[in-house]
């Protein structure tokens, strides 16, 4: 059996038609207009220009869970994994992931992050660890993607560090918990 991959080529004359949905904004006159912020007037991808936005303090908090076997959970808890201190390495991975977000997510702006905090909670009853990442910036754009990427990379780091014991681990429930600052205001995930 053979497989072939075909790659698309960018054709500037091709017009991207966004799916009809509630991706809309209100014009100055109050009428609803369709708009995608990362598509220009010629339907080409673009990075949003934030130069006219004001600098505000912005904080985003995201979390996620990694579930595993009792053997893997105990190896992490007792620090007996062959690759070293799993949770400490996961925190470093989460911080690196948050810092590298603009290199991984195509339309994210490179940001001068003020601080990143990580917390790992043991969920003994389900043999899991919950990672929470908080990212702070004084800037013109939010840090939700940085918090979410930090959680993702931190949990993947745990998987990598302990996969010799358990390859069936599951990464679940990655979600934005809260955000503050910016034009859209505050958000808190409902429980």
Image (tube, grey):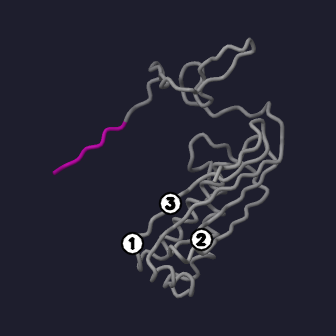
Please identify, in this view, whether the residue under mark 1 or under mark 3 is nearer the observer. Answer: 3
Residue at (52%, 88%) from the top-left corner?
80
Percent position of residue 88, x then y = 63, 76
Dot 3, how many residues are within 10 Å of its Cα: few (below 14), some (14-19), or many (20+)?
some
Residue ID for mark 1: 167
Q: Position of residue 153 (x, y in %)?
A: 56, 61
Q: Residue furthest left?
A: 1
Mark 1 or mark 2: whose residue is earlier in sequence: 2
- Quarter holding residue 100: bottom right
Which region of the structure is painted magenta? 1-7
Give left or right: position of 91 versus 71.
right
Q: Residue at x 66, y 53 (%)?
A: 177
Local SS, label 2: helix
Q: Earlier in the sequence, mark 1 or mark 3?
A: 1
Assign the magenta stretch its main secondary structure: loop
User: Disc 1 and disc 3: Cα gap in Å?
Assistant: 15 Å
Q: Are marks 2 and 3 in contact (CB under 8 Å)?
A: no
Residue, disc 3: 172
How dense is the environment of label 2, judged by Cα within 10 Å: few (below 14), some, or many (20 and up)? many
Q: Is residue 116 above or below residue 92?
A: above
Name the residue beneath numbered marker 2: 90
**Magenta includes 3?**
yes
Q: Label 1 neighbourhood size at 10 Å, few (<14), some (14-19), many (20+)? A: few
SS of the residue under disc 1: loop
Q: Are marks 1 and 3 in contact (CB under 8 Å)?
A: no
Front label number (2 vs 3): 3
């Amino acid at each position: 059996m053979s497989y072939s991959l075909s790659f698309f080529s960018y054709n500037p004359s091709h017009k991207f038609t966004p799916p009809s949905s509630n991706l809309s904004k209100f014009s100055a006159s109050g009428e609803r207009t369709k708009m995608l912020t990362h598509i220009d007037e010629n339907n080409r991808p673009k990075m949003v220009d934030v130069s006219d936005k004001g600098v505000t303090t912005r904080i985003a908090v995201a979390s996620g869970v990694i579930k595993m076997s009792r053997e893997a959970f105990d190896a992490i808890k007792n620090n007996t994994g062959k690759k070293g201190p799993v949770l400490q390495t996961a925190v470093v991975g989460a911080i690196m992931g948050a810092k590298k977000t603009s290199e991984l997510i195509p339309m994210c702006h490179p940001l001068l992050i003020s601080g990143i905090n990580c917390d790992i909670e043991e969920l003994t009853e389900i043999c899991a660890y919950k990672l929470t990442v908080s990212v702070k910036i004084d800037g013109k754009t939010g840090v939700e993607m940085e918090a979410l990427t930090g959680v993702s990379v931190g949990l993947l780091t745990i998987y990598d560090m302990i996969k010799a014991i358990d390859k069936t681990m599951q990464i679940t429930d990655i979600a934005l918990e809260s955000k503050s600052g910016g034009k859209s205001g505050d958000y808190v995930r409902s429980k």
